[in-house]
Image (cartoon, helix red, strand yellow):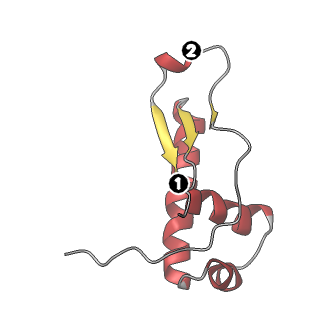
Amino acid sequence: MARPKKQRRVCARAPFECFKPNGIPFTDLDNVSLLPDELEVLKLADLNRMNQIDAAKEMQVSRQTFANIVKSARSKVATCLIDGKALIIEKQPHKD
């Protein structure tokens, strides 16, 4: 049985729901979902240029977990750019 997913600190929220290639209807595109924690790591690592140790502390995850999330997020973004897919930014679930 898999270990339960640890709560991650996510501060970034996208003001949009997706990116897609121009001129192609959304219904004709394959979609790739970017999770809230993947958006956060892209912000911390690539936009804010934080090192992985500091960024992992800010997200309250291990450095290895941060590295795994960065790898996944960058792969998804590259796939969308190279293969012309729509990138869907998933919304963070609300806490009750």
Q: Is residue 50 above or below residue 71?
A: below
Q: Dot 2: what SS? A: loop
- Mark 2 is on which residue type? Pro
Q: Which mark is residue 25?
A: 2
Counting the numbered discs, the total is 2
Q: Is residue 52 left or right of residue 66?
A: right
Q: Which mark is residue 73?
A: none
Q: Is residue 76 left or right of residue 18?
A: left
Q: Is residue 41 above or below residue 2?
A: above
Q: Is residue 57 above or below residue 66?
A: below
Q: Residues within 10 Å of mark 2 (few under 14, many from 20)?
A: few
Which x, y percent locates residue 22?
A: 68, 20
The alpha-carbon separation of the residues under discs 1 and 2 comes to 23 Å
Q: Dot 1: what SS? A: loop
- Mark 1 is on which residue type? Leu
Q: Which residue is more in the foreground, 29 or 40?
A: 40
Q: Earlier in the sequence, mark 1 or mark 2?
A: 2
Q: Residue at x 55, y 82 (%)?
A: 61
Which x, y percent locates residue 95?
A: 55, 63
Q: Is residue 61 left or right of residue 12?
A: left
Between tags 1 and 2, which lies in front?
A: 1
Q: Which mark is residue 35?
A: 1
Which x, y percent locates residue 15?
A: 74, 43
